[in-house]
Amino acid sequence: MFKLRNIQQRLITIKKLTELESRVHNLDAASKVLITIGFVLAIISLDYFELPKLMYFACYLIFLIRLSTIPLKTFLIPVMMSSIFVGSLGLASWYWAETEQILFLNTVIVDKSVLIGLTLLLKTILTVCATTLLAVTTKKLELYQGLLRLRVPEIFIWQLMLLGTYLQVILNECIKMLEAYALRSNKQTILWPDYPLLLGQLFLLSHKRAIQIYQAMLCRGFSNISSFTVESRFNYRSITVSFILFFYWSIN
């Protein structure tokens, strides 16, 4: 239950961060989506032995984070979770792979598997930080409108919008159900025989809440996602072109 409350508190914190004011927050959502996609693709396209080139992207991302006034601790949990996963894969590959020494930067002799693991870890950290920066600097409604302007299929935007809204609803219902279970059983942990009952109850509650939300949406005249309008404050085409030129210069 405490873990669910931490997730709930983190979602509330992300919502508060999207309401801050900075130059990154004020950028058009469509431009931020394109910049993030271009940033990730540029990182993925780099070879495993091009570790110095990743420093360009790291400096660029640090500059954007400082410009957005987002606290660095916001990126701590996503980076730690991804680093543990990728780090374990890197250690496994280093243990099982054959040892091969290569000349790095024409000055240092390092193990090939170690260099590949460090590059993969840095790529993962930069990708996670870039996507997290997009999530904490863009309001949900602006993000949906930005995707709509980028000609993303409306069915995908519908699914994304309902997922973001319904996830919080399910989380609240799950917390209430666990609190009721703890009060009635005087136990802080759930017994294994009670898991199927709780999951079945959660399914019924989620189905009931889904019907209520759908009826509320119909009563409020929600018929098309394009009925929402968000004012575009920047020309995202010029901004996107400038960042594409930056990516091209960094790679080459």
Image: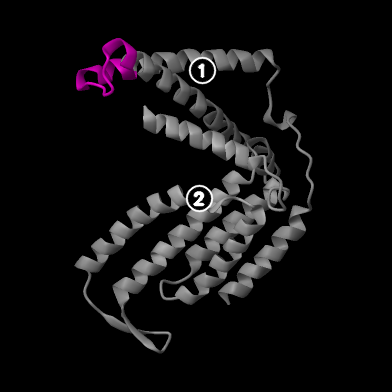
Report x, y in % for residue 95: 21, 67
Within-10-Å neighbours for mark 1: few <14, some 14–19, many 20+: some
Task: Name which residue lies at 68% across and 21% down.
Answer: 222
x, y percent for residue 224? 69, 26
Which image quarter holds the C terminus? bottom right
Q: What residue is disc 1 on?
A: 210
Residue closest to the eye, 2 or 194: 2
Q: Residue furthest bottom?
A: 107
For the point 75% across and 56% down, which residue is it?
A: 237
Camera-nearest label, 1 or 2: 2
Residue 244, horizontal then vertical, whole percent: 66, 65
Residue shown at 67%/64% (left/top)? 243
Going from the N terminus, do you reach mark 1 or mark 2 first? 2
Three-letter residue code for mark 1:
Ala
Q: Secondary structure at mark 2?
A: helix
- Describe residue 120's horizontal placement relative to residue 114 as left or right: right
Crowding near pointer 2: few (<14 within 10 Å), some, many (20+)? few
Q: According to the image, what is the colour scheme of the structure?
A: one colour
| Numbered tag placed on residue 73 in the rendering | 2
Relative placement, left or right, of 90 versus 24 is left
**Where are the magenta residues, as a range?**
182-199
Q: Secondary structure at mark 1?
A: helix
Quadrant location of residue 88? bottom left
Residue nearest the viewer, comparing 202 with 181? 181
Classify 113 as above or below 148: below
Q: Give the Cα distance between marks 1 and 2.
A: 34 Å
